[in-house]
């Protein structure tokens, strides 16, 4: 009751800016999805597939996991879009660096 009264006294920018946060059930669902994706990564690494298929597969799974963690557990989905730009820039820089290292080590040769 006191919390509702306190929220009613806050200005509009404080009450509506973080609305719609997920419930605990949503967090558990995302955690299960991350667990399954991690299992797929481990399975792919032990499956004995060629490097030309393994590296892109692991990279796509890593990007999906990164997006899920950043959007849900770090609440970026509910925050200002400017914060998302920082993570996209970081992911882009890491991707370029990763590809440069793979090319310089001739991972696909």
Image (cartoon, rainbow, N blue to C red):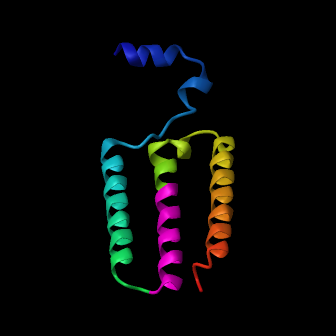
The region drawn magenta spans 50-67
Residue at 41% over, 43% down: 22
Rendered-image quadrant of the N terminus: top left
In the image shown, does 25 or 53 lie closer to the viewer?
Answer: 53
Principal secondary structure, stretch drawn in magenta: helix
Residue 62 drawn at (x, y percent):
49, 63
44 over 77 or under it: above or below: below
Residue at 37% over, 54% down: 30
73 over 39 or under it: above or below: above
Task: Assess whether residue 32 is covered by the magenta stretch.
Answer: no
Residue 108 drawn at (x, y percent):
58, 83
Residue at 47% over, 68% down: 61
90 over 97 or under it: above or below: above
Residue at 32% over, 60% down: 35
Task: Assess whether residue 51 is covered by the magenta stretch.
Answer: yes
In the image shown, does 20 or 82 lie closer to the viewer?
Answer: 82
Q: Residue furthest front?
A: 105
For residue 80, side relative to residue 56 (left or right): right
Residue 107 drawn at (x, y percent):
57, 78
Residue 55 drawn at (x, y percent):
51, 76
């Amino acid at each position: 009751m006191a919390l509702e009264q306190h929220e009613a006294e806050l200005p509009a920018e404080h009450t509506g800016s973080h609305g719609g946060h997920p419930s605990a059930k949503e967090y558990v669902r995302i955690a299960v999805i991350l667990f399954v994706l991690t299992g797929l990564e481990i399975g792919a690494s032990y499956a004995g597939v060629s490097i030309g298929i393994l590296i892109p597969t692991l990279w796509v799974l890593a990007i999906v996991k990164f997006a899920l963690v950043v959007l849900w557990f770090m609440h970026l989905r509910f925050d200002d879009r400017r914060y998302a730009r920082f993570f996209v820039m970081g992911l882009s820089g890491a991707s370029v660096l990763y590809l440069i290292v793979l090319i310089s080590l001739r991972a696909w040769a």
